[in-house]
């Protein structure tokens, strides 16, 4: 029996903080859990499944202690920024299998307070060394810059087209009272910002913030009787790519595998999707992800993103909260993609609401494009 449509997101809450040196990551986890449970009309005592990541090898145990949780099912899958999208799919499977009845997914980070270099750090801790790359000190942003350079070489994509993505995300952030940066910017502003790793400028890169959020999932049947309109998990898929300098096509990213499979499992087409929340660690991440998901053909992403189609009022509004480029990016942003999609499908996105939104696609990226990375795609819909 298929798991799709049998599980719903019943609660969602985003922590409003963007800089909280007075708080610990565990405090943000706890406050986010409380907010999501209140949103669902449930309490911590209802939770029997717990999912989290970004808290170290056995951090889930410490978080269970901190939250006074004694779950029947746990999952600390850690595949980078897509982890929390993955957790939603795993929770759907666990609930459908009877492993738990109410799943809580939490995230909290104080990356900005700790001055953690999200985009310019070297190879991530725990990754095996690459004998030909490691001696030269590759950085996260350097890896994405290679992807951008390759796309420009193959298709003639311009820095101005990438800049349009940053401008659109900032426009959306202007409608989000909690966004870290809300002041409008222009293409000229992006191109005039300092170069970080050619061709990516400062404003092509995500913000660094503190933050967190939480989700509550349960069976669709139970969710119908709870406080808020349920948002159904209609389909999803996970994929990985293991790339590197001189090995494979840098533009063959995991979304190319997970996207079509998620859509097929949900029984929907690209034209059915009303809004799209994709990982935006950099402007190039948005462009190549939309291509890989199939919303436009390879090489057409620059024009697709630059002509207004990904903005509010366009054919495919993307990251309507401002995304990681302007709203927040505490290090692992996948949970915020899901939260914003839930807002849209509930009709609760305020001035950023997409009219009559019924279906949303969420895609998280973990690790680094151009190297080892994960891609998780999920289709959400109204009940």
Image (cartoon, rainbow, N blue to C red):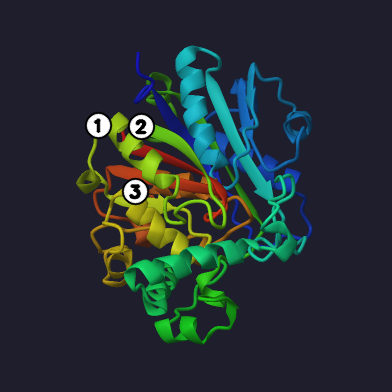
Q: Which residue is mark 1?
A: 267
The answer to whether any part of residue 196 appears in the image is yes
Q: Nearer the viewer, mark 3 or mark 2?
A: 3
Q: Position of residue 150 (x, y in %)?
A: 44, 66
Which residue is located at x 36 percent, y 49 percent?
344
Measuring from the top left, give residue 333's x and y in whole percent: 56, 51
Q: Which residue is mark 3?
A: 293
Question: What residue is rendered at 55% in x and 17% in y?
Answer: 100
Asked if one can make out residue 177 in the rendered structure from this viewpoint, the answer is no
Please state the total of marks drawn on the protein image: 3
Q: Earlier in the sequence, mark 3 or mark 1?
A: 1
Between discs 1 and 2, the one toward the N terminus: 2
Q: Nearer the viewer, residue 15 or 227?
A: 15
Can you identify the residue that label 2 sits on?
Answer: 235
Task: Judge whether 316 appears above or below 67 on screen.
Answer: below
Nearer the observer, 261 or 379: 261
| SS for callout 3 | helix
């Amino acid at each position: 029996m298929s798991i799709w449509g049998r599980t719903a997101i019943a609660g969602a809450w985003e922590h409003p903080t963007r800089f909280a040196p007075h708080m610990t990551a565990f405090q943000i986890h706890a406050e986010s859990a409380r907010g999501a449970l209140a949103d669902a009309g449930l309490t911590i005592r209802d939770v029997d499944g717990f999912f989290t990541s970004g808290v170290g090898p056995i951090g889930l145990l410490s978080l269970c202690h901190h939250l006074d949780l004694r779950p029947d099912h746990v999952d600390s899958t850690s595949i980078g920024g897509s982890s929390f999208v993955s957790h939603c799919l795993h929770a759907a499977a666990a609930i459908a299998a009877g492993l738990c009845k109410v799943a809580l997914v939490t995230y909290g980070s104080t990356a900005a307070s700790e001055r953690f270099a999200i985009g310019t750090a070297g190879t991530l801790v725990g990754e095996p060394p690459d004998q030909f790359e490691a001696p030269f000190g590759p950085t996260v942003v350097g890896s994405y810059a290679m992807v951008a350079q390759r796309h420009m070489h193959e298709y003639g994509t311009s820095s101005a087209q990438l800049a349009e993505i940053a401008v659109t995300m900032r426009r959306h952030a202007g409608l989000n009272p909690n966004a870290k940066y809300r002041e409008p910017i222009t293409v000229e502003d992006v191109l005039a910002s300092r170069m970080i790793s050619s061709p990516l400028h400062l404003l092509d890169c995500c913000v660094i913030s503190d933050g967190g959020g939480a989700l509550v999932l349960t069976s669709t049947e139970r969710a119908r009787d709870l406080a808020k309109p349920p948002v159904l998990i209609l389909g999803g898929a996970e994929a990985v790519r293991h790339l590197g300098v001189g090995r494979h096509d840098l533009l063959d990213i995991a979304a190319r595998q997970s996207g079509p499979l998620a859509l097929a499992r949900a029984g929907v087409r690209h034209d059915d999707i009303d809004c799209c929340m994709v990982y935006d660690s950099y402007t190039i991440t948005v462009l190549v992800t939309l291509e890989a998901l199939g919303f436009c053909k390879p090489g057409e992403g620059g024009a697709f993103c630059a002509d207004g189609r990904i903005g509010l009022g366009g054919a495919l509004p993307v990251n309507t909260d401002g995304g990681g480029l302007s709203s927040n990016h505490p290090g692992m942003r996948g949970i915020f993609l899901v939260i914003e999609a839930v807002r849209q499908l509930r009709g609760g996105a305020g001035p950023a609401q997409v009219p009559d939104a019924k279906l949303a696609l969420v895609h998280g990226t973990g690790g680094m494009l151009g190297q080892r990375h994960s891609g998780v795609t999920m289709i959400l819909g109204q009940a």
